[in-house]
Image (cartoon, rainbow, N blue to C red):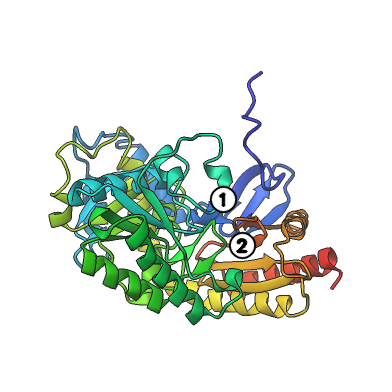
Amino acid sequence: MAQLSPLLKQATPVVVDHGEGVYLYDVDGKRHLDFTAGIGVTSTGHCHPHVVAAAQEQIGKLVHGQYTTVMHQPLLELTKRLGDVLPSGLDSLFYSNSGSEAVEAALRLSRQATKRPNVIVMQGGFHGRTVAAASMTTSGTRFSAGIGPLMAGVHVAPFPYAYHYGWDEQTATKFALRELDYLFQTVSAPNETAAIFVEPVLGEGGYVPANTEFMAGLRERADRHGILLVLDEIQTGFGRTGKFWGHDHFDVRPDIVLIAKGLASGFPLSGIAASQELMAKALPGSQGGTYGGNAVSCAAAIATLEVIQRENLVENAAERGRQLLEGARVIADKTPAIGEVRGLGLLVGSEFTTADGEPDAATAAAAQQTASKNGLLLLTCGPYMNVVRMVPPLIVNAEQVDDALRTWGDVVASVTGS
């Protein structure tokens, strides 16, 4: 009998029968409040009726029309709709299936367009598990261990993770930008550097937001040296942070944006957006793929955009995000086991530390597992896996946030003795 790979580590023991909104129902009929959203994917909740109807209708028309062979209406319509929400000037799109593929497409475009070999990534960033994307990932060695040698030409600069350094945010930011300048002098000369890749909020790295000064510093250096600024919005895009794009919080202009996760409410779809001028600098035929821009996924993405707009989900993410962040901080104030609570919108992380300030992965894991037993599904993240993250669907309401916080408060009290 075939079995799933033992290398797949399950975060919870739940076997799902069906999902509805912010809830998952297991095969025994137990209801679970899902504050994982498939790692930020089910943006409109599980099985939103409008998204389901769009996918069902499309399945009866066309499931797959390979988009370098033929065009199809959902692909063209989605491209038009995305043109209304993409950052100004980013008017050319390439579609793929996963976040890793989008990262590699942006890497390929950056190198070909600039004719430069190197890229800079941020300490703690996550960009995927394929070889090039894993080479660019520093949120944990588990993503790249045992597959070396990794891709050459990737250099790592600090991210202003103030809590980790034990500094205030301004000090951490000045340090990060100063070290980036030092990197240009010692490791990757600016005229050898194609792009800087950065997440507006570190995802797997611990739900650490960037800030305006840091992003402005990256933009200024990119402009000064002719380097492309690539914003990985795979987890932070489509309203997740309480603004449509995570980088909208920081008033920064990207050259390339990466999209995936919440774009299609659970259907596999990703892509990159850049200007027509920049896209044209890459080599003909350098973009493609069998399943990119799948017709059903595109139909689901169109419906997702409609739901986000009609139901004011960006505004809801901002309001419920404030509620969730404030509530999680109240709980943290009652126990020294949580060193910091941070986030943007519906990305909230609670970092567990020991009495002497060291990362406490054991207590974070105990809290996450206990929450699961009590009907609240959460995940851990961070280089030390000591951050418990909350990433509910954008449709979550105030009562459901309160329910989650009540459960979380009881869980934290039980595992920390606070």
Image: 288 above or below 206: above
Please identify the quadrant where the C terminus is shown. bottom right
Which of the marked residues, 1 or 2, is nearer the chain's N terminus? 1
Q: Residue furthest top?
A: 1
- What residue do we see at 41% from left, 48% from top? 99
Residue at 65 percent across and 56 percent down: it is: 384
**Residue 339, label in figure:** none
Q: From this viewpoint, is residue 25 visible?
A: yes
| 266 lies left or right of 374 | left
Amino acid at the residue labelled 2: Arg
Asked whether the viewer can see residue 402, the reply is no
Residue 5 position in % (x across, y down)? 62, 29
In this figure, what is the number of numbered marks?
Answer: 2
Judge left or right: residue 253 versus residue 203.
Answer: left
Q: Label 1 sits on what residue type?
A: Gly
Q: Decide: is 97 above or below 376.
A: above
**Viewer-nearest residue: 241 or 403:** 241
**In the picture provided, is 229 more to the left or to the right than 132?**
left
Q: Which residue is mark 1?
A: 140
In the rendered image, the vertical position of residue 380 relative to residue 4, given as above or below: below
Of marks 1 and 2, the one in the foreground: 1
| Residue 314 image offset from top left, x and y in percent | 42, 71
On the image, numbered disc 2 is attached to which residue?
Answer: 389
Q: Which of these two is toward me, 363 or 236? A: 363
Tell me where residue 28 appears, x and y as whole percent.
Answer: 74, 44
Using a 10 Å C-alpha cutoff, classify the residue at mark 1 as few (fewer than 14 neighbours), some (14 to 19) or many (20 or more).
many
Label 2 residue SS = strand
Dot 1 lies on which element?
A: loop
Image location of residue 285, percent across then percent down: 18, 36
